[in-house]
Amino acid sequence: METEEENQEVIDLKSVQLVKASYHEKVQPSVDELDYNSEGFESGAGSEVAIGRIHFSLAYDFTENTLSVGIIEAENVPAKDFGGYSDPYVRIMLLPDKRKKFETKVQKRTLDPVYNETFHFKNLPYSDIGNRILAMEVYDFDRFSGHDIIGIAKLPLIDVDLAKPMEDWRILTPPSSTGWRTKVTPELGEICFAVRYVPANGKLQITVLEGKNLKSTDEGGYSDPYMKICLIQDGKQGKKKKTTVKKRTLNPYYNETFTFNVPFEKIETTSLMVAVLDFDRMSKSELIGKTIIGALASGGPELRHWQDMLASPRKPVAQWHALS
């Protein structure tokens, strides 16, 4: 059972440092700084401009109706950081379906990232393959100002012979030449929180900082959002904590801290799910969106946040996350 002390504990924002900027300076970037990108459309191949290339593999299991996509590596990725590097990761989809997505891990400070990761699109009949386009989007990871899209490679699967496994390179093209939008705010909004782990005493701490551009659920165009944090260990849900409710806002500010007991030998199989809900006094709270970091993380940014926390014991690591 959570205590009043847990809800009142706050994190010292001065202790969360970025390169050349404090967390307090970056926690509310302007809309123009946000570079989350997830949607786009097909374009002609005649105007493509090369900005690197991506190495991938395809294999189709006719028995299991499963398409396996391997992201092997990328070469000559453009630099997005001031130091002349990028922190690239790859998102893959089978268009026109944009709901099912996979993401590689983030490779830090490199223009030639190596991934060697394989993802499986299950329950995909061979008769449907010809209607799909493999889209591989390369992003530059940025914890606070959003993720810049670096380039896109598309492959109509109707042009691929899947009778046997194949491996190939594909040219990356910039979003401006493919028609893909480069400044899109996540549909459900974003949340920012910091996590800290102290191995010596097995304390996992999460400080829920704020939300931004949350989806409205009330008729007046607002929500009454609160966040629920759930500890997941070995795939099973455990203790839960809740923030206070913020009335009539889509940009709530919390700065509320909660602590879970997680022994060091359990941390590798632990996850945190952070869900945003709209409070309703007369009926059940409505889910706005959620994100998961840790062992069950589904994407590169979520995995990166957890890995950075483990790499910096006793220090709070803050990051924005898009809700899904």
Image: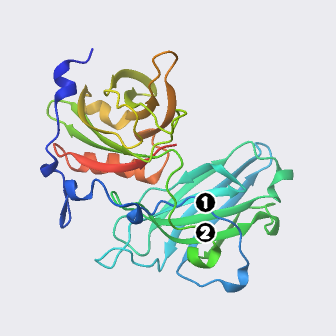
Q: Quadrant of residue 195?
A: top left
Question: Who is closer to the viewer here, 155 or 224?
Answer: 224
Question: Who is closer to the viewer here, 249 or 258?
Answer: 249
Q: Which residue is mark 1?
A: 39
Residue 238 in sight here: yes
C-alpha gap between disc 2 and disc 1? 7 Å
Q: Position of residue 94 (x, y in %)?
A: 69, 56
In the rendered view of the protein, which quadrant contains the N terminus? Answer: top left
Residue type (three-letter) at the residue carrying disc 1: Glu
The residue at the point 25 percent across, 48 percent down is 317
Question: Who is closer to the viewer here, 39 or 60?
Answer: 39
Residue type (three-letter) at the residue carrying disc 2: Trp
Would residue 32 be found to the left or right of residue 43 on screen?
left
Q: Position of residue 300 (x, y in %)?
A: 45, 53
Q: Which residue is mark 2?
A: 180
Give the mark nearest the N terminus, 2 or 1: 1
